[in-house]
Amino acid sequence: MLVHFIRYLPEVSEAELQAMARKSSAPVTNAIHMEFTAMRRFLVATIAAVMLMAWSPALGAHPGHEQKVLGTVTMVAPDHVMLKTPDGRDATVQINNDTKFVRAKKAVTASDMKVGMRIVITAVTDGDDDKLIAKIVELGQAPATK
């Protein structure tokens, strides 16, 4: 629909310019033709910019691209971990056999992850259901015990 709108925007031909000149007492020059062309270009550029801004959030979220999730662990299960992000949102990230766990650049196991621990997860989105799947889980310091 938008393409049809842009395609049929009026273009002023030389014959139409001459007709305008005969009907008007003001002289019509090539400047009017240039003004119509400039207006059309501006309209096309504005529509393209609006469409790009509307689609830009979806561009970074397609499957297979890494993203970082950081926060405090609220629950640990064999197949996923839940955490609270710094902005207060709850996040769930799936864990599988390919997930690597590290602390201070040394390999650790999933059982070393405890509730209250700060972690950074490098994850990718699953193409089927948009779940986050952890590739690397970086563990912070163990939570203080009382």
Image (spheres, rainbow, N blue to C red):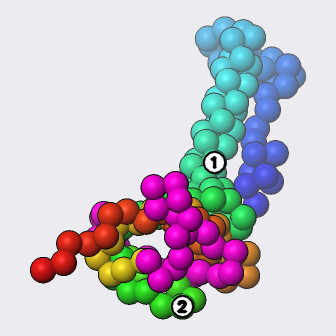
Percent of width and height locating residue 138? 48, 63
Camera-side residue of 65 and 37? 65
Report the disc number at residue 78. 2
Residue drawn at (78%, 20%) of the image: 17
Which of the pair 49/104 is nearer the observer? 104
Tell me residue 5's x, y (percent): 74, 51
35 up-or-down from 87: above or below:
above
Q: Relative to 143, is 39 above or below?
A: above
Q: Residue at x 72, y 9 (%)?
A: 29
User: CB atoms at circles 2 and 1 under 8 Å apart?
Assistant: no
- Region of the chain picked out in magenta, as a range: 84-112
Q: Residue furthest bottom?
A: 78
Residue 52's mark? 1
Q: Amino acid at mark 2?
A: Pro
Which residue is at a point 75% across and 11% down the rendered structure image?
30
**Circle 2 — which element?**
loop
* Spot occupied by residue 123 in the image (x, y as percentages of width and height): 59, 66
Quarter of the image where one finds residue 34: top right
**Marks 2 and 1, how far apart in space?**
41 Å
**Which of disc 1 and disc 2 is earlier in sequence?**
1
- Quadrant hosting residue 14: top right
Residue 93 lies in the magenta-colored region = yes
